[in-house]
Amino acid sequence: MKKYFILLLSLVVCFSFIVPAGAEELSRDKRALVERINTSLSEMNTDLSSTATGSAEYKLNQLGGEALMMLPQLAGMQGAKVSFDYSLNAPADQMGMQWKMNYQGKTYQGDLYFDDSRVIFTKDFLEMIKEINPAADLPDLNTMPQYLYVDQPEFAQMWTSPWLGSKINLIMPLQSELLTFILEGVPNNTISSYGNDLRISIDQQQFAACLAGIMEKIQKDPERFADLVAKYVTTLDPSQSYDVIRSDILADIKVENNQVPTADEMIKSMAEAGFEFNNLTYVIPRGKNGPSSFTLNMKMKDPTTAKDLGEMNFKVDQVKSGDKIKGTMDFDVKGVVKEQNIAFSFKLAGDYDQTKTNATSNMSLTIDTTQGAMKMFNLGMDIISQAKVDKHVNIAVPVLTPQNSLNLDQLTSKEEQETVQAKMFPGLEKPVDVAINGKPLKFDVQPIIKEGRTMVPLKDLAEALGCRLNMINDQELYLVKGNKYLLMKIGERKYTLNGKTKILDVPAFVKNGRVLVPIRFIAEGLDCQVKAEENTVYIMSY
C-alpha cells in the first residue's frame, strides 16, 4: 500500500477532477456533490483533444542569469518568439505543425509531422540551427533531401494515452469508481452545504483525518481497492500487468497488519517530514451554472528548525454559463535548497475560455533561481493558445521516398543514435532488458536508455549480484561485494570505486520511487563482464 500512497494523496487533494458515481456509503452532501460533478462529466467534450486545429505562441520576454554563461548560444534568445499552427487527428495517430521562430530580427519557419511512430521535419530546422550556431556539427545541408525523420516504436506510445481524444472515456469511469471509494473513507464533515453551493474545506487536522479514514477503508475492503487501482493503472499504462499490480497491493496491505494510523499519528508523521497542509477549499454550485473555485496551500519546513523550505499555492476561479466556461488560474511554487544556498520560484498564471467547440488561454510563466545574492537564472514567457474542433481535419503527411527523405539514424553510428535522439527528444526513454548469467532479471521499474547509457534500478541489481546495499541520508548509495565497494550520491557525476574518484556519464536519479544507475559502471566496477546486444544487456558475474 505504501507504493500507492502518493497516488492516494494526489486523488485526495485534486478535488477539481473528482468524478465519483454510485457510492452506497455517502452522506447527503456527498451524494449531492456526486450528482453535480457527474452532470459536469456528462457535458464534457473531448473533441478538442481528438480532431482539432489550433495555434500556440511562446514569447520570451525575459531570459538571463549567470547560468547562461555556460550556454552562450541562449544568451540572444530574449525577445524570441516561437509559434505553431497545428492540426490534430488522434484517431488516425497523426498531427501536423507549421512552426515559425522570430529570432534577432530574422524569421525561420518549417513543417513538423507526427505520424504513428515517425517524427518528420523539413530541413529548415537544421538550417535554422546552422545559422544561429555556425559551430554546430551538422552535415552539408545542400546535399540533404527535403525531409528528415526518426522512426521509433516508442513514439507510437503517445497515441495510446487515455488522455488523448476519445480514449479519455476509458479512464473516466475507472477514476469515478476509485475516487468514490476514497470519498467513502473521507469524514462527512469535510463536505457540506453552503448556501446554494457545495463546499469541501480541509485543514491539516482534517487532511490527516481524511488519510486515516481512507487507509482504514482500504484495510476493511482491500480486494475492492486493489481491483480498482490495478484497473486504473493498467488503463493508464497497458504495458503493466493487472494481476501483478493487484497482488502487490494486497501484499502491501497485508504487511501493514491492520495497523491503521490515527489522525494524530498522521500529523506527527507529517511534522517529522516537514510537511504542512494548510488548506484545501473547493466550492461548486448545486446547479449547472454559476461560479466555482478551488484553492490549495501546502508548505515544507525544516523539521529541526521549523524554517520554511518551500510553499505551493494553487488557485482556480471559474464561471459556467450554458456551455461557456471562463476562468483564471494561478499556480505558484517557491522553495530553497539550504545546502547550496539556492532559492527558486515558479509561477504560471492566466485566464482561459472554453466551449464545446473552442478553447483559448493566455498564460504567463516566470522562473527565477538565485544562489545567495547571485541571480542564476530567470525566465519570463507569455503563452497564448487557441483550439477549435474540426471533425473533418485533414493532415497532409508527406509521402516519404528514398529520393525526398533521410532517416536520421543513417547519419550516426548505432552507438551514437541513442545520444542524438536523447538530445533531440529529451522526453524519450527507450526500454531495455537485462540478463545476469543467462537468466532474465525482473525489475519493478523498467530499465531505460538515457543519454546513451542503460539505467537500471539499483536495489534489484544489487540483490542479483549478491551485493550489500546501504542508503545514507536517502541520498548516498553504498554498495559492497566482497572486497569491492562503491559509493555514489544521487544526482552527482562523481563517485568512489575502491577509494578512487571516478566520473559517471549519467548520474543516479530517482524514477517511480526507485534509484536508477548506469549498469555498466556498476557491474564492471564489481568485476562483472558486460555485453550489450540490440535492446538487451548481458552480465556475467563470477
Image (cartoon, grey):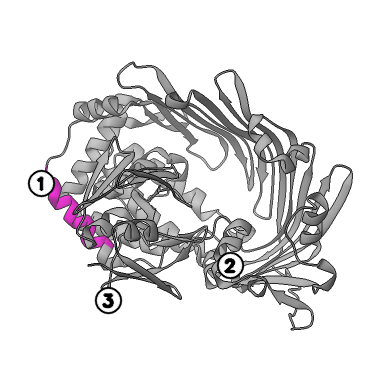
Amino acid identity at mark 3: Gly
Q: Earlier in the sequence, mark 2 or mark 1?
A: 1
Relative height, residue 318 to residue 531 (above, below): above
Q: Residue at x 15, y 48 (%)?
A: 220
The residue carrying pointer 1 sits among few (fewer than 14), some (14 to 19) or many (20 or more) residues within 10 Å by Cα, namely few
Query: Can you tell which mark lies on residue 414?
Result: none
- In terms of sequence position, does the residue under pointer 1 or pointer 3 come before the other? 1
Whether label 2 touches label 1, CB < 8 Å:
no
At label 2, the amino acid type is Gln
Is residue 82 one of those drawn in magenta? no
Residue identified by numbered label 2: 417
The x, y position of residue 109, in whole percent, is 83, 57
| Residue 536, percent from left and from top | 40, 73
| Amino acid bearing label 1 | Asn
Q: Is the magenta stretch mostly helix, strand or loop?
A: helix
Where is the C terminus found, in terms of image quarters? bottom left
| Front position in the image: 113 or 492 | 492
Q: Distance between the residues labelled 3 and 2?
A: 27 Å
Cα separation, mark 2 vs mark 1, equals 49 Å
Q: Name the residue under label 1.
A: 257
Q: Which of 284 and 293 is in front in this view?
A: 293
Q: Is mark 2 on a helix, strand or loop?
A: helix
Direction from residue 204 to residue 60 in the image, left or right: right
Residue 300 falls left or right of residue 188 = right
Which segment is the magenta one?
245-258
The residue labelled by disc 3 is 438
